Amino acid sequence: MKRLLSALGLVSLIAGATACDGGSSSPPTVSVTSEELAPGGVYIVYMNASADCSQGCNELAKGDLILEVDGQPVSTATDTRNSKIATGEPVKLKVLKKDTKETKEVVLVAKPTDKLPPVKDAPPFWTVGAAALDKAPEWARRAHFGHVAPSIMLVNADGGILSGRDLVGKKRLIVFWDIATREEQAQAADIMGVLQMAQADLNAKNIDVMFTQIQFPSNTRQAPWNDSALREFQTNNGKSDMPPLPLYRFPNSTEYNAAKEVGLEGATSYIQYLRAPPAIVVLDENGVVRWHSEGVQTPPADHVNAKVPPPQFTIIEAIEFALALQ
């Protein structure tokens, strides 16, 4: 990925771009701190309310750390996959409780469930290794970080609709961008060029790119674009010698179906938690949000990429993170 920088050749489309940690004048929200993850083990991302769980689930909560399964230390989501914990038989978990900071033993009896279609064999709870989750920088730990795929309904400009549950099963790098100002459009164009150059590397790692235009809650002046406008934007601003990006948008009034705006965690729409564009979200194959940044980040003065314009620096950091995702 480092070769991407030397090959960029992109001139920043933004004059005097400024730093933006969180993209808003309000204090940035850091979701899941390094201090919380320091004890290690496996972090419980979300408790599945529809789980087939006859014992133990009521003793667990989001943010708890599973340290052992049947006396064996665990450190990755693979260590707590269904075949090891959701067997229908009693399984002993050693758990560090988030609320009390105390360690306790929980006997779990659970089975996978198909009550979250199209997700098959949903676990009693979603997990991610604490050390793996802790790899994201603080500025990429906004509201969705450390959660599972939120309620969402997106339309592919080339046809088809995705819900939050449809995102499970494959790694994703999603850029949510808006068009309220010329600066926002310029940032999107800058990011698009970098993503086009990295798309082949991302796809080779089974990471899907989703370049998604939505109307952020802060945008009260500019209605979302339609498919034709999105394609025109990519034609006018993209790199013509490289494959275009997959374009997505929020459904219009005739396309929208509330029943299809679903995710793994609750019913709150993802849009309610997006404050400022561009918002970048990286999900692992289990649907866990491993990166959520907002706005553009100015590189530190001592960083190897210190002279890279903020929009390019922000997306390059997200791309490199996604490529190293485990």
Image (spheres, rainbow, N blue to C red):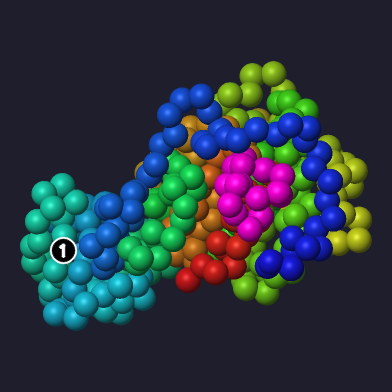
Q: Is residue 304 magenta?
A: yes
**Along the viewing direction, whichever of 6 and 191 lies nearer the viewer:** 6
Query: How many numbered marks are there?
Result: 1
In the rendered image, residue 312, in percent from the top left (x then y), is placed at 70, 49
Characterize the local packing of mark 1: few (<14), some (14-19) or many (20 or more) Cα atoms within 10 angstroms: many
Q: Nearer the viewer, residue 38 or 170?
A: 38
Q: Looking at the image, can residue 264 be seen?
A: no
Q: Residue furthest front?
A: 302
Q: Looking at the rendering, in which quadrant would you find the N terminus?
A: bottom right
**Residue closer to the observer: 317 or 158:** 317
Relative height, residue 318 to residue 120 (above, below): above
Identity of the residue drawn at 15% across and 47% down: 99
Q: Is residue 79 left or right of residue 315?
A: left
User: Left of 256 or right of it: where is 86?
Assistant: left
Tell whether position 168 is magenta: no
Disc 1 element: strand
Q: Amino acid at mark 1?
A: Val
- 312 vs 112, left or right, is right
- The residue indicated by pointer 1 is 95
Residue 241: quadrant of the picture: bottom right
Numbered range of the magenta stretch: 296-310
- The residue that appears at 39% across and 52% down in the rendered structure is 146
On screen, residue 173 above or below 294: below
The residue located at (49%, 48%) in the rendering is 140
Quadrant housing residue 96: bottom left
Q: Quadrant of residue 305?
A: bottom right
Residue 219 percent coordinates (x, y):
63, 24
What residue is drawn where x is 39% and y is 59%? 134
